[in-house]
Image: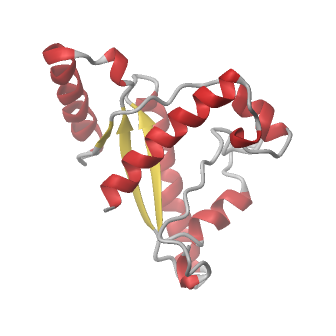
Amino acid sequence: TRGGSHPDFDYILIDIPANLYTSADEIKPEISQLFIDSDLVIFPVKAEPQELKTAPKLGNYVANLTQFCQSKGIPVNTKFRSMLCFESAKYRGDKGLVKITDTIVGFAKTFHNTIPPILAPMIFRSLYPNKISEARSIYSSESVEAKTAQQEFDAVAQQIINTLN
C-alpha cells in the first residue's frame, strides 16, 4: 500500500469480492478507500462476453473516483490496470492460442488498450460468498472445494506477481 505502511512486504494482494456495489449500484465506500490507499489496482477480467458489459462500468468508476479525489484535494497516485483471465483448459492447442489472441485484440479494440493475459482460471464457487458472509478467507477451510479455490487463487496471484516482476 502507498506510503510505506507495510515496508516488510513487496506486494499485498487483496482479492476483492465481486460484490463491489451497494444496493444503490454504487461502489462501496470501503472499496473506494482501499483503491485510494493502493499503489496499484489490477482488475482481472474474465475473457468472456459478459465482461464487455462489466469492464466499461469499472472504467467509469475509476474515472469518477479519480475526478472526485482531485476535486476534494485527495492525492491519488494509484495506477489502475486490467488483465484478461483465460481458463487455460478452454484454450488448448493452436486453436486455443488463436482464440486467446483474437480475444485480446477484441478487448483492445473495445477499450483502446492492450490488456495482458492471465492463463489461470477465475471460476465462481459457492465458497466465495459463504466465506465473505462469515468474514473469513478461503484459506480458513480445509474442504476439497476450498483447496481447489485456493489453488486457483494462487495461480492467478502468481501470474500477477510474475507480470509485476
- Which residue sits at x=70%, y=39%? 138
Quarter holding the C terminus is bottom left
Between 54 and 163, the one lying in front of the other is: 163
In the image, taking residue 136 as reference, residue 62 lies left or right, namely left
Residue 15 percent coordinates (x, y): 60, 48
Total numbered badges shown on the rendered structure: 0
State which quarter of the image contains the N terminus: bottom right
The image shows residue 127, relative to residue 59, as above or below, that is above
Residue drawn at x 34%, y 60% is 164
Location of residue 100 (image quadrant) = top left
In the displayed structure, would residue 114 be above or below residue 99?
below
The answer to whether residue 39 is left or right of residue 27 is left
- Would you say residue 99 is visible in this rendering? yes
Q: Answer above or below: position of 133 versus 39.
A: above
Q: Residue at x 40, y 31 (%)?
A: 52
Q: Residue furthest right?
A: 134
Q: Residue furthest front?
A: 142
- The answer to which quarter of the image holds residue 107 is top left
Residue 118 appears in which quarter of the rendering?
top left
Q: x and y percent of residue 128 in the render?
A: 70, 33
Q: Nearer the viewer, residue 10 or 35?
A: 10
Residue drawn at 21 percent across, 37 percent down: 109
Left or right of 27? Residue 48 is left
Camera-nearest residue between 96 and 138? 138
Q: From this view, report whether residue 79 is shown above or below residue 119.
A: below
- Is any atom of residue 126 visible in this view? no
| Residue 163, percent from left and from top | 31, 54
Q: Position of residue 11 (x, y in %)?
A: 49, 66
Q: Give the colouring mode of the picture.
A: secondary structure
